[in-house]
Amino acid sequence: MSKIHAAITAVNGYVPDYILTNQELETMVETNDEWITTRTGIKERRLLKGEGLGTSDMAVPAVEGLLKKRGISAEEIDLIIFCTVTPDLTFPATANILAHKIGAKNAWGYDLQAACSGFVFGLATGAQFIESGKHKKVLVVGGDKMSSIINYEDRATCIIFGDGCGCALLEPNEDGYGIMDSVLKSDGSGAQLLYQKAGGSVRPASHETVANKEHYAYQEGQAVFKFAVTNMADVAAEVMERNSLTADDIAWLVPHQANKRIIDATANRTGVSADKVIVNIQRYGNTTNGTIPLCLWEWESKFKKGDNLILAAFGGGFTWGSIYLKWAYNS
Ligand code: UT7
């Protein structure tokens, strides 16, 4: 029997309606459109507005759309891996909340937290359950309501992040399509350069942590940038080299959308030309776990069966990783 690969067989995405433009940010913090555009590539981002709405509320329409596209019911899903840093609640897992909301009665699930690399780690993890033969349908969701942990008085972070959610279905493929390889890395020495200071077991929520604004995302941008710009590029190059792939072999580079300059550095390092690099950061900003699945969703109609894709991400932790996959269908 030929090897079972985990192939993506459907993708979908959801972004909220509200658009926060650079112009509106100019009225909120000391910044300007020119600075944001040249330093990050971002023009606007989406925010999930409304009382009582969390990350799962973006996942529901994304997943329901995916199921419709694939023509399957929620009850056919075996496993849900929900990649997020903004779960609905600390516990239980948002994967369980989502399963209940969509009626995935036969699925088990869990949340995966690897900051902006979460979706790449989630695909690589989900692939194991397919390759082992244990599961036939694994749903990997990547999404964040970053606006729930952003301080809109902090120009170092509020200009970057946005809300959004995407998802991909993994199924077995014995014809040589699907996830071929991955390189996954982490380094905890970078933990305090991009993190949420309070709310965990070390520093539980208190009047003091709230007063000190410690429940917001904190980032030392320049330090993170230095790590991101080399590591995301290196890991993409590594997965290509060890699979003997040159830039000409790559149909699409799908980078995490943190900063256009980091995306460009990854493209340069891998030699992939700009027309093959997926970029939507100008419209959505950094949606953390949502960036890569949102890119897959928006470019799905351009992908052809057999296309070689390189996914690459870098995030807090630090975490970083890259996946080489052969696209499995024409849409
Ligand atoms: O996705 C997970 C991983 N995260 C990342 O990959 C993000 C990595 N970091 C970055 O993308 C960039 O570091 C930022 C976009 C966050 C910041 O860009 P930068 O080029 O590193 O700017 P900087 O922090 O070095 O600041 C440069 C200047 C400073 O002014 P002075 O000291 O040179 O006078 C800042 O005070 O720009 C100033 N500045 C701003 N000006 C206008 C910082 N933020 C802003 C702002 N608007 N929003």
Image (cartoon, rainbow, N blue to C red):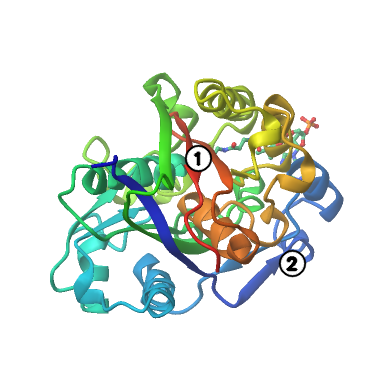
User: Under tag 1, what secondary structure?
Assistant: strand
* Amino acid bearing label 1: Tyr
Furthest residue in direction right, as rendered: 34
Residue drawn 27% across and 38% down?
A: 203
Q: Is residue 228 left or right of residue 145?
A: right
Q: Nearer the viewer, residue 320 or 302?
A: 302
Q: Could you tell me how many numbered marks the image carries?
A: 2
Q: Which badge, 2 or 1, is on the more N-terminal residue?
A: 2
Residue drawn 39% across and 38% down?
A: 197
Res 213 seen here? yes
Q: Is residue 16 left or right of residue 188?
A: right
Q: Is residue 257 left or right of residue 313?
A: right
Q: Check disc 1 and report the residue beneath it.
A: 218
Residue 166: image location, x then y, percent: 46, 62
Q: Quadrant of residue 209?
A: top left
Q: Nearer the viewer, residue 165 or 239?
A: 239
* Figure quadrant of the N terminus: top left
Residue 30 vs 314, above or below: the answer is below
Q: Check disc 2 and report the residue beneath it.
A: 24
Instruction: Estimate the spatial distance between the alpha carbons at disc 2 and disc 1, rounded to whole Å.
Output: 22 Å
Residue 199: image location, x then y, percent: 30, 46
User: Under tag 2, what secondary structure?
Assistant: helix
Residue 141: image location, x then y, percent: 37, 59
Residue 40: image location, x then y, percent: 73, 44
Q: Are marks 2 and 1 in contact (CB under 8 Å)?
A: no
Q: Nearer the viewer, residue 278 or 227?
A: 278
* Figure quadrant of the C terminus: bottom right
